[in-house]
Image (tube, rainbow, N blue to C red):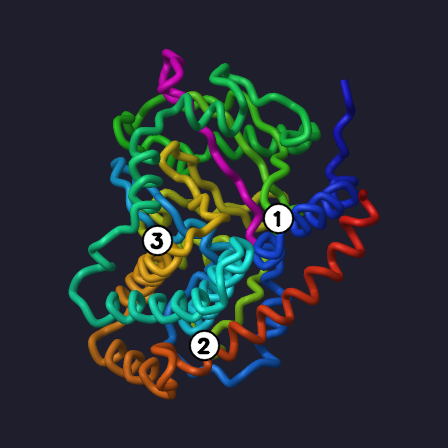
């Protein structure tokens, strides 16, 4: 059996994996280059200052999707909050616009479609701020299809997708690596903690005093920008009789400093794990209420149970007809997440700012259009250079 890298050796193996993942497509590069995004943004056009609220910080479209709450209700919300900070909501708009524009270019859609995407994005976002409704009422067919799929999913679907089997074991291989003795001991100790056990038993249909047993755990080779951090997956049994419906998969992920700029006047939580959970509760309540900040090996981590209904939007290829509707709907989800933190005066002020400087030929702020076009050009050059340095060498 192949020996997996020790904790100290992992970075050497994970860095090339991350580089190759980012080389798969221009959109994959956009998703994996959050730090570079903000570096480029600092050199770009002047961005209006919106109200100081919790923002996602990495609001690309793959970070939105169906998310279930502890009682089983499923909604489309933001599903990854690693970069969340109290900051400028304009940053989420630009990040989402760049993601959608990159996906449109990857789908070989005409340039006019990108302009329409930005228009519909702004309309959807403003609708959520101005309307008493949370988001656009009409869901694009592509979103409806994904939601229907999410609601029908059960434990076996999650198990087959994540651990490739419904048997109570995490298979070792390229995706899951062996733990060191120290890691195994630390995780065993972690699942004995009262707050961890409460998080797991608080899910729908479980008794508060149910027996919680750690069955297996592994280092998880997952993500792109997060590769190299602590990342564990744990298989846990809940109750005395362990049948498939009594198993749960727990994700434990290291929380590190956010690349997204925060409001220097805002009071932030003490640890990065607390920051991620606080941002999640503000922006994505379905997810935030299922998360717990912890410490392991002196590092800040976030724990959450993976549910079958939590899936990302698989929209790598956009059709011309769907692109604008999807853009408007996703922007309305982001607008609802921002808007629930604003009072009426803040919303009016931010809407007024968004309506300024709109050219006659485009119903979107000129600063948003300038940011997106300049970022697309910068990312295209950086992506090709990344492929030359990493993908070509691997080939």
Q: Which residue is mark 3?
A: 284
| Disc marking residue 83 | none
> How far apart are the alpha carbons under marks 3 and 2?
24 Å
Task: Mark 3 or mark 2: name the one nearer the start of the chain.
Answer: 3
**Residue 389 x, y percent position in the rendering:** 80, 56
Does residue 160 lie above or below 315 as drawn?
Answer: above
The answer to whether residue 138 is seen in the rendering is yes
Crowding at mark 3 (Cα within 10 Å: few <14, some 14-19, many 20+): many
Q: Residue at x 38, y 13 (%)?
A: 243
**In this view, the mark in front (2 or 1):** 2
Dot 2: element? helix
**Residue 117 x, y percent position in the rendering:** 40, 65
> How far apart are the alpha carbons under marks 1 and 3?
22 Å
Does residue 41 lie above or below 105 as drawn?
Answer: below
Q: Which residue is mark 2?
A: 368
Dot 3: element? loop
State the extent of the magenta-drawn residues as a range: 238-255
Q: Which residue is mark 1?
A: 224
């Amino acid at each position: 059996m192949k020996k997996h890298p020790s904790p100290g050796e992992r970075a050497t193996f994970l860095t090339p994996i991350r580089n190759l993942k980012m080389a798969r497509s221009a959109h994959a590069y956009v998703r994996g280059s959050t730090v570079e995004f903000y570096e480029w943004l600092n050199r770009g056009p002047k961005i209006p200052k919106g109200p100081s609220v919790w923002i996602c910080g990495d609001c690309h479209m793959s970070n939105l999707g169906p998310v279930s709450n502890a009682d089983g209700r499923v909604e489309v919300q933001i599903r990854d909050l690693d970069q969340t900070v109290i900051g400028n909501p304009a940053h989420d708009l630009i990040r989402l616009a760049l993601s959608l524009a990159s996906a449109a270019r990857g789908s070989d859609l005409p340039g006019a479609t990108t302009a329409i995407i930005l228009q519909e994005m702004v309309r959807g976002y403003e609708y959520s701020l101005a309307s008493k409704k949370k988001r656009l009422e009409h869901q694009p067919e592509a979103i409806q299809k994904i939601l229907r799929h999410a609601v029908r999913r059960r434990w076996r679907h999650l198990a087959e997708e994540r651990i490739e089997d419904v048997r109570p074991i995490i298979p070792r291989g390229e995706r899951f690596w062996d733990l060191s003795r120290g890691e195994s001991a630390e995780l065993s100790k972690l699942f004995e903690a009262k707050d961890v056990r409460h998080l797991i038993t608080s899910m729908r249909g479980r008794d508060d005093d149910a027996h919680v047993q750690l069955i297996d755990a592994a280092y998880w080779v997952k993500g792109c920008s997060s590769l190299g951090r602590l990342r564990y997956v744990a298989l846990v049994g809940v109750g005395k009789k362990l049948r498939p419906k009594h198993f749960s998969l727990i994700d434990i992920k290291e929380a590190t400093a956010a690349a997204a700029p925060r409001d220097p006047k805002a009071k932030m939580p003490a640890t990065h794990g607390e920051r991620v959970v606080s941002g999640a509760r503000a922006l994505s309540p379905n997810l935030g209420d299922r998360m717990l900040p912890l410490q392991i090996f002196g590092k800040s981590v976030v724990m959450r149970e993976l549910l079958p209904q939590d899936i990302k939007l698989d929209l790598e290829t956009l059709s011309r007809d769907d692109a604008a509707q999807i853009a408007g709907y996703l922007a309305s989800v982001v607008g609802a997440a921002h808007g629930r933190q604003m009072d009426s005066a803040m919303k009016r002020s931010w809407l007024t700012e968004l309506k300024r400087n709109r050219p006659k030929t485009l119903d979107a702020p000129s600063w948003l259009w300038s940011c997106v076009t300049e970022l697309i050009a910068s990312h295209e050059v950086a992506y090709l250079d990344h492929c030359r340095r990493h993908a070509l060498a691997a080939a």
